[in-house]
Image (cartoon, rainbow, N blue to C red):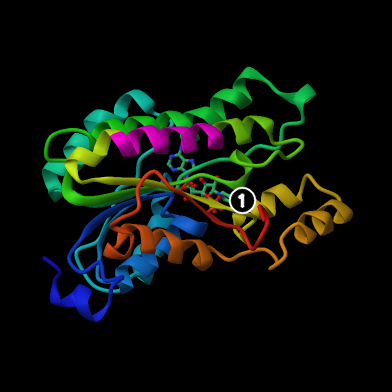
């Protein structure tokens, strides 16, 4: 049944409990703020308590909580998640936005850099999906959104390991969508192009001014904002996305066009 809130605003997330990882910064923070304006209650995850509190202070509504956690602790994720759900009740949505990127031209690849990117970007996404498959973890009608990247779709020199991690997220999304569909839970990915956040600022440090200009030129609409991605995530979480699963939504200012 479509609620009154959804009838008046198809993107309403009224009363839905949504867990957002990476909520302490950039895209995750903008997503949490937007979802709170759409009526959701948020569980905010990241490592920095201070930055999570800043996000919390920017939210509309009540009933939100910060849950500092290091997603590098892959083996701890199931127990942590179980505790979270026992305290908060089942989720209506999950946004896996936590991620790291390290610029790694092939000759500078190390096992440590592979581990660092795979752990957060792939292992934690996989383990969170496992947790969401648990009985009573996510309500029917729920929606999981993983933040991938255009790097998982299109080659980018110096980013092969990051690209592999985001390609893995896209592959996970498609198979999980099929697996979760009988439970009426949707799984989609959003693949952003370059977005003005701390991550892009860090990437700029490894590039010359000419390289930054060339990167900008690959985005016909210019670099994006965290809010541009947040809107796409909210669309997939809300009933507006109710017939969409297994999709990869590029939000990239035309980069992949
Ligand atoms: N910005 C872009 O151009 C761009 C483009 C395509 C895709 N993306 C993807 O978008 C997502 C968000 O990136 P962003 O641009 O918003 O970057 P950001 O501002 O650097 O935010 C990254 C977030 O990930 C969290 N995080 C990292 N490692 C973590 C860990 N071990 N445990 C828990 N949280 C962790 C950080 O929280 P703490 O620091 O508190 O741990 C932070 O909230 C990432 O998955 C990224 O790959 C970004």
Residue 51 as seen in the image, left or right of residue 40: right
Question: Looking at the image, which is closer to me, 5 or 29?
Answer: 5
Rendering quarter of residue 196? bottom right
Tell me if I can see residue 71 in this picture. no
Q: Which residue is mark 1?
A: 199
Taking the spot 40% from the left edge, 37% from the top edge, the residue there is 174
Measured along the vertical axis of the image, is residue 15 above or below residue 180?
below
Mark 1: is the Cβ under 8 angstroms from ligand 1? yes
Residue 219 as seen in the image, left or right of residue 152: right
**Residue 234 screen position, x and y as percent:** 37, 63
Q: Main secondary structure of the magenta part?
A: helix
Name the quarter where the C terminus is drawn. Answer: bottom right
Q: Residues within 10 Å of mark 1 (few under 14, many from 20)?
A: some
Question: Looking at the image, which is closer to me, 114 or 188?
Answer: 188
Rendering quarter of residue 24? bottom left
Question: Looking at the image, which is closer to me, 66 or 185?
Answer: 185
Tell me if I can see residue 68 in this picture. yes
| 45 inside magenta stretch | no
**Residue span colored magenta:** 166-178
Question: Looking at the image, which is closer to me, 135 or 118?
Answer: 135
Which residue reaches farthest top? 111
Secondary element at tag 1: helix
**Residue 147 screen position, x and y as percent:** 47, 47
Which residue reaches farthest bottom? 8
| 175 inside magenta stretch | yes
**Residue 219 screen position, x and y as percent:** 71, 60
Taking the spot 53% from the left edge, 63% from the top edge, the residue there is 226
């Amino acid at each position: 049944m479509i609620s009154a809130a959804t009838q008046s605003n198809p993107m309403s997330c009224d009363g839905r409990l949504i867990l957002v990882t990476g909520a302490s910064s950039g895209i995750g923070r903008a997503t949490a703020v937007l979802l709170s304006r759409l009526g959701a209650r948020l569980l905010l995850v990241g490592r920095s308590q201070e930055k999570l509190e800043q996000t919390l202070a920017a939210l509309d509504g009540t009933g939100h909580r910060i849950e500092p956690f290091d997603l590098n602790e892959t083996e701890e994720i199931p127990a942590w998640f179980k505790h979270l759900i026992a305290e908060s009740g089942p989720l209506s949505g999950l946004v896996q936005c936590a991620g790291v990127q390290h610029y790694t031209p092939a000759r500078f690849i190390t096992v440590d850099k592979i581990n660092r990117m795979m752990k957060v970007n792939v292992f934690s996404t996989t383990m969170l999906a496992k947790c969401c498959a648990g009985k009573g973890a996510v309500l029917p009608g729920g929606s999981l959104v993983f933040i991938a990247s255009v790097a998982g779709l299109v080659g980018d020199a110096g980013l092969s390991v990051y690209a592999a991690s985001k390609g893995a997220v896209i592959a996970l999304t498609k198979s999980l969508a099929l697996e979760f569909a009988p439970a009426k839970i949707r799984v989609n990915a959003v693949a952003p192009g370059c977005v003005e956040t701390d991550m892009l600022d860090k990437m700029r440090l490894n590039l010359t001014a000419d390289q930054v200009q060339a990167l900008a030129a690959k985005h016909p609409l210019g670099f994006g904002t965290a809010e541009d991605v947040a809107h796409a995530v909210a669309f997939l979480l809300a009933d507006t996305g109710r017939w969409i699963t297994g999709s990869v939504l590029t939000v990239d200012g035309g980069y992949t066009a």
